[in-house]
Amino acid sequence: MSAQPLFSRTAAGSVSSLGEGGLIRRIRTWLGRANPPSPFGMGDDCAVIRPARGRGLITIDPVIYGVHFDGRVSAAQAGAKLVRRNVSDIAAMGGRPLAAVVALALDGRVSTAWLGVFYRGLAREALRQGLPVVGGDVARLDGHFVATLALTGEAPGRVLARSGSRVGDWIYVTGSLGRSLPSGHHHRFRPRLAEGQWLARQPSVRAMMDVSDGLARDLPSLCPPGAVPAVYASLLPRRQGAGLREVLCDGEDYELVFSVAAASRRAALEAAWRRAFPGTRLTCIGRFVRAGHLPPDAVDLAGYHAYEHLR
């Protein structure tokens, strides 16, 4: 882990001393094996990537200093988080990643040493995911640091979208929820990539997404028309010390939430999951019911407000 501050105290230690061309050359060095040689990586107006087998996927997400990380998170952890949160989106569709580009918008005072550690952390995680980083861009943004990663992927089989659930379907979630920030889970998590691909192969799984803005905000996106999610406080898988509001509203869990057909053989699905992923918890937290018929002992998610951008 690096204690290097984001902003340099000296001009010589800042990215402004390198200039754009010098910084790009450093970025190539920092990425190392994660950046293929031209034209399959940096160095041309566009990178050449292989086409998707099956359906192509694309997603984009940033890490912003002061929003997604701060001085308590090392530069390497921030770089790894940038890769992981994008890969989590691919996992939520049952896909696998293909190639990434990274755009930087940063103050000229950003420390060259800090940025080097950031890119090496990014590169290690990209290599772990089998993901080439094939290019990007650099722009000046006074007073800030924003790194945005755009990621292509492929779904060789079925694509699991957020739509597709029906009234009566069961609701499942992987892992545990709540207290992502104080526990450090928000940057240490592992995207559920293998799990998402496995779930996409199960005919009984109807719809899926990842939990990034909090279960109370994300779960309604899976809800079929004319229905509401009926989840139960006693069933929610909680990270240590997490209360109900934290479980529903904290966000940055990056777990998968999905619906399973009401008539499916749930016991067989759960047993197959335990064989495939013995170290990953799987929990049924409720089901979708018709609007106006929420059981009295179910949690009314309308009373909980999770994270929302610009609010």
Image (spheres, rainbow, N blue to C red):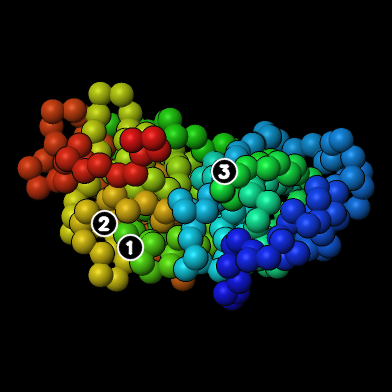
Name the quadrant of the N terminus: bottom right
Q: Residue at x 85, y 49 (%)?
A: 21
Residue position marked by numbered label 3 in the rendering: 61
Residue 179 in view here = yes
Seen at 85% across and 54% down, the residue is 22
Quarter of image, res 267: bottom left
| x and y, in percent, of residue 87 in the image | 59, 50
Q: Which residue is mark 2?
A: 246
| Front-most of residues 71 and 42 | 71
State the CA–CA distance, disc 3 to disc 1: 21 Å
Which residue is at the far left? 296
Label 1: few (<14), some or many (≥20) within 10 Å? many
From this viewpoint, which residue is outermost toward the top?
Answer: 226
The foreground one among 23 and 124 is: 23
126 to the left or right of 38: left
Of label 3 and label 1, which has the lower sequence position? Answer: 3
* Mark 2 residue type: Glu
The answer to whether 50 appears left or right of 8 in the picture is right
Q: Say what amino acid the circle numbered 3 marks.
A: Asp
Secondary element under disc 3, as helix, strand or loop, is strand
* Residue wearing tag 1: 179
**In the depicted structure, whether residue 77 falls above or below residue 37:** below
When the figure is inspected, residue 105 is found, relative to residue 166, above or below; the finding is below
